[in-house]
Image: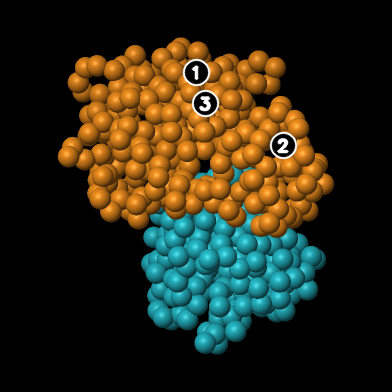
Chain colours: A cyan, B orange
Amino acid sequence: MHKAVIIGGSAGSFRVITRILNALPKHFPIPILLNLHRLKHVRSGFVEALSIKSNLPVVEPYDKESIKPGIAYLAPSNYHMYIELNKKIALSTEEAVNHSRPSIDLSFETAAHTYHRNLLGIILSGANKDGAWGLKKIKEAGGTVIVQDPADCEVTTMTQTALKMTEADHVFNAQQIIDYLLKIK
Amino acid sequence: MGKYEIGIVDTRNILKAIKESYDLDFKNHALTFFKRRLEYILGKYKLKSADALIGKIQNDKEFFEVFLKEVCIETTELFRDPSLWRYLMEKFLPEVLKGSGTYKIWFPEVSSGEELYSLAILLKEMGLLDRVQFVVGSISQMRLDDVKQGKLDVKKMEVNHANFKRIFSEAELEGYYSVEKETGYIHPDLIKNMDVALQNTYYDKHPRSVKLLMWRNQMLYFNQILQERLLKSFCHTIVPGGHLIVGMNEKIDYWNSGKDYILVGEKENIYKKRFS
């Protein structure tokens, strides 16, 4: 039933993401959309760092690139990443939202519009509120939402804000998130 | 967030109103982008509905100027992607400015000016600014007026300074701008060799003999029809061997089937127009 998974995180999420990418098989059946806050002037290196332990390709998409299963798309630094209805990615340099560009909220909201109940949204460790509103939108559109257990997070602002705004389907630690993803057919 | 939502039908009605009132055609802007931008404008100017916006557009010319300014997405900061500017300084510009004669650089959509100012500062640091003629356009007269005065958003100065330092560890950005009444102005000498031209949404007022066309992160907001049209028309304007620079995450390959442009700076997305 899941046709795409979208994951947001900031401070403290890098290790969790690498664990997830390391655990997933090469031919993961659905696309993975990643929106992780990072230093914006650091353009290269991040994809490479994520790729080292990943079994599936990690790419920074081009504007209007088609979304395909088995690929992890990382929101490029200093761009917003929107998920369009025609299952393509659109990038933009519009205003930062909650001091964030890329904004997790915007990626989540547009992915919710596109995938509705077939979307799995996951929010990980992070130091600001970005993503909480977007996670609510995923839930409202009928999607499934997972929040990393704040007890398992290095920084809890993001997950705690998300839990305040939305009733999560699951509150999982990193290993439980991986186990859940591995069951996706 | 998400307070002002309009539908696709509303969006099309607004497009129609703009076309009828001002003969400006936004139908080949990316539809979801344009819808989102309209929602942003509705929120910012506290308009209650798409109809309220249509009324404002039809009856308030001054508001429409503001509207056009909002549709031109800002170029975000000085020296966005520092590695590009380092490459331009160390490799690209010394090579293309080897000869004599004026080197014409066109910014079809100058927007908030940061790309222009960055290049001007870079050339000044290199001692090559006098060799260059800038031509800048915009669909917004307000944007052009701001750029003519060298206006610079002071809210972005922290990131501007940080980017500058990543390129010029020895120099200071301070000498290149001043602040009056909370508005930044870049030094007028930087843009004294500059012509400006108001454009329509097809950017079809072309200068002659362009040697470098700066077009970063502009195609993001257009659909494929407009992207293709622009890339083809720009090709007639750039001199053979001249260059086109697009954004880091933009691809022109789809519309480059005739191989009008050859990728020469792969990491930095610099294309060269073929000689034949």
Label 1: few (<14), some (14–19) or many (≥20) C-alpha neighbours in 10 Å = some
Q: Is residue B232 visible?
A: yes
Question: Closer to the observer: label 1 or label 2?
Answer: 2
Judged left or right of residue B16, residue A21 is: left
User: Alpha carbon of mark 3 to alpha carbon of mark 1: how far?
Assistant: 26 Å
Q: Secondary structure at mark 1?
A: helix
What amino acid does circle 2 point to? Ile
Residue A169 percent across, percent down from the top left: 72, 79
Tell me the number on the disc at residue A120.
none
Mark 3 and 1 residues: CB-CB less than 8 Å, in contact? Answer: no
* Residue pictured at 50% horizontal, 30% vertical: B199
Q: Which residue is mark 2?
A: B57
In this view, A97 is above or below B121: below
In this view, A93 is above or below A60: above
* Residue pictured at 52% horizontal, 33% vertical: B200
Q: Secondary structure at mark 3?
A: strand
Residue A105 percent across, percent down from the top left: 66, 58
The residue marked by circle 2 belongs to what chain? B
Q: Which residue is mark 3?
A: B198
Quadrant of the image occupied by residue A8: bottom right
Judged left or right of residue B143, residue B252 is: left
Give whichever of discs 1 and 2 has the lower sequence position. Answer: 2
Judged left or right of residue B263, residue B119 is: right
What amino acid does circle 3 point to? Leu
* Labels 3 and 2 positioned on one and the same chain: yes
Q: Secondary structure at mark 2?
A: helix
User: Alpha carbon of mark 1 to alpha carbon of mark 2: how far?
Assistant: 38 Å
Q: Which residue is mark 1?
A: B176
What amino acid does circle 1 point to? Tyr
Residue B167 percent across, percent down from the top left: 40, 32
The residue marked by circle 3 belongs to what chain? B
Judged left or right of residue B190, residue A138 is: right
